[in-house]
Image (cartoon, rainbow, N blue to C red):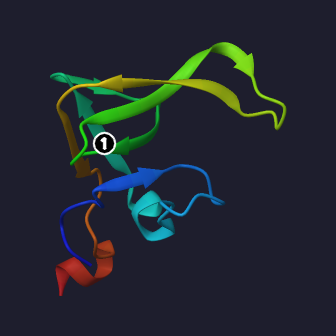
Amino acid sequence: MSDTPPDRLSIYPDSPHFDEAAMERGVGVRFKGNERKDVEEYSISEGWIRVALGKKVDRHGRPLTIKLSGPVEAWYQSGGESEGDAES
């Protein structure tokens, strides 16, 4: 697995942009210079993130989201190897 996260990622398993391996490693997102913990979907190349809009939910029980535009950076929060493999 490469050390760069996918260009577009979603936290919802039914999305075509969901990547289970990336979610297991943990992906950090910085938007406009601030680290965000509430990102539900992002696109680095298009320069946007989706975040929850308060406590409102749609008819499927998911939070309503708002799309914010600006510079997006993403990185993996943990390494791709397990700790036992790194020592060898």
- Judge whether 63 appears above or below 1 on screen: above
Q: Please give the name of the residue rendered at 77% of the width and 28% of the height, measured from the top-left corner.
A: 58
Question: In the rendering, at what x and y percent does residue 84 appear?
Answer: 31, 80
Position of residue 7 relative to residue 51, above or below, is below
**Position of residue 17 measured from the top left corner of the image (x, y, whole percent):** 47, 60
Residue in view at x 63 percent, y 59 percent: 13
The number of discs equals 1
10 Å crowding of disc 1: few (<14), some (14-19), many (20+): some
- Position of the C terminus, as image quadrant, is bottom left
Q: Amino acid at mark 1?
A: Gly
Image height check: is 60 above or below 54? below
Residue 64: quadrant of the picture: top right
Residue most extreme to the front: 46
- Name the residue that disc number 1 marks: 28
Most extreme residue toward the right, as rendered? Answer: 59
Give percent across and percent down for residue 25. 38, 61
Residue at the location (33% across, 75% down)?
Answer: 82
Give the secondary structure at mark 1. strand
- 8 and 75: which is toward the camera: 8
What residue occupies the far bottom of the structure in this picture?
88
Give the quadrant of the N terminus. Answer: bottom left
Image quadrant assignment for residue 73: top left
Image quarter for residue 52? Answer: top right
Q: Position of residue 29 (x, y in %)?
A: 29, 38
**Residue sitting at x 61%, y 51%:** 12
Residue 42 vs 50, above or below: the answer is below
Given residues 20 and 83, the one toward you in this image is 20
